[in-house]
Image (spheres, grey):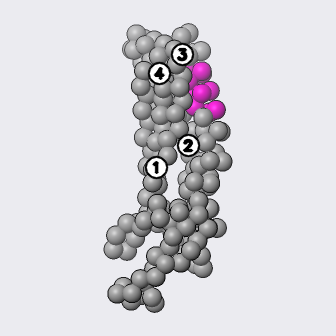
Amino acid sequence: MGFAVDVAGGDRLRRVQQRLKQLGDTGLGRVMGRELRAASDALRPAIRTAAGEHMPSGYGPTLSKSLLFRQAIRTARQEATVTFTTRARGKAEPRRVTALNRGIVRHPLYGNRAHWYTTPARPGFVDRPVARLQPQIRRRMDSVVAYVADQIGA
């Protein structure tokens, strides 16, 4: 399950990228990439905490320990995109994070994998923290682009 935050920097982002290319990228491109990645760092603990709160009877800590996160930064001509993906390890196969996020927990009856049952859970353990933090992430990404633009005079 993933989410993306787009920052449409428009002409300013395009000028920053062109200017960085002209200057031979004096390390500010790396700084910009590092800061764009750091903008979404608050999501990891928020999603882990929400997993513990949303899941039923002891499954929350198990799920929160098994969560894996991956993020990718892409800067195109006029926008920067951070894609944040959430996955979870399971014993035999990956956990179904999309179904868990919808509030559907499937489990075997006392470890008997021949009989599976569904238990409802509170939906949104990924969606709620993302919705809450997305404006903050977007503001931070905008400020990173503005900082680099000011440093290089773009």
* Pointer 3 residue: 12
Label 2: state its secondary structure. loop
Q: Residues within 10 Å of mark 4 (few under 14, many from 20)?
A: some
Quote the CA–CA distance across marks 2 and 4.
20 Å
Asked whether disc 2 touches disc 1, contact meaning CB atoms under 8 Å apart, the reply is no
Nearer-N-terminus badge (4/3): 3
Name the residue that disc number 1 marks. Answer: 2
Closer to the observer: label 2 or label 4?
A: 4
Residue at x 53%, y 62% (from the top left corner): 101
Amino acid type of the residue tagged 3 in the rendering: Arg
Real-space CA distance between mark 4 and mark 1, rounded to the nearest whole angstrom: 22 Å
Query: Circle 4 sits in a helix, a strand or a loop, which is it?
Result: loop
Upstream in sequence: badge 4 or badge 1: 1
Label 3, label 2: how many angstroms apart (C-alpha)? 22 Å
- Residue denoted by label 4: 78
Residue 41 against residue 146 in the figure, above or below: below
User: Magenta span covers which residues?
Assistant: 139-148
Numbered badge on residue 40: 2
Q: Amino acid at mark 4?
A: Gln
Mark 3 element type:
helix
Amino acid type, label 2: Ser
Mark 4 vs mark 3, CA separation in Å: 8 Å
Q: Earlier in the sequence, mark 3 or mark 2?
A: 3
Indicate the quadrant containing the N terminus: top left, top right, bottom left or bottom right: bottom left
Q: Is residue 53 above or below residue 14?
A: below
Q: Visible in this render: residue 121? A: yes
In this rendering, the label closer to the viewer, 3 or 1: 1
Query: Which numbered disc, 3 or 2, marks the residue closer to the eye?
Result: 3
Residue type highlighted by circle 1: Gly
Q: Position of residue 105 (x, y in %)?
A: 50, 73
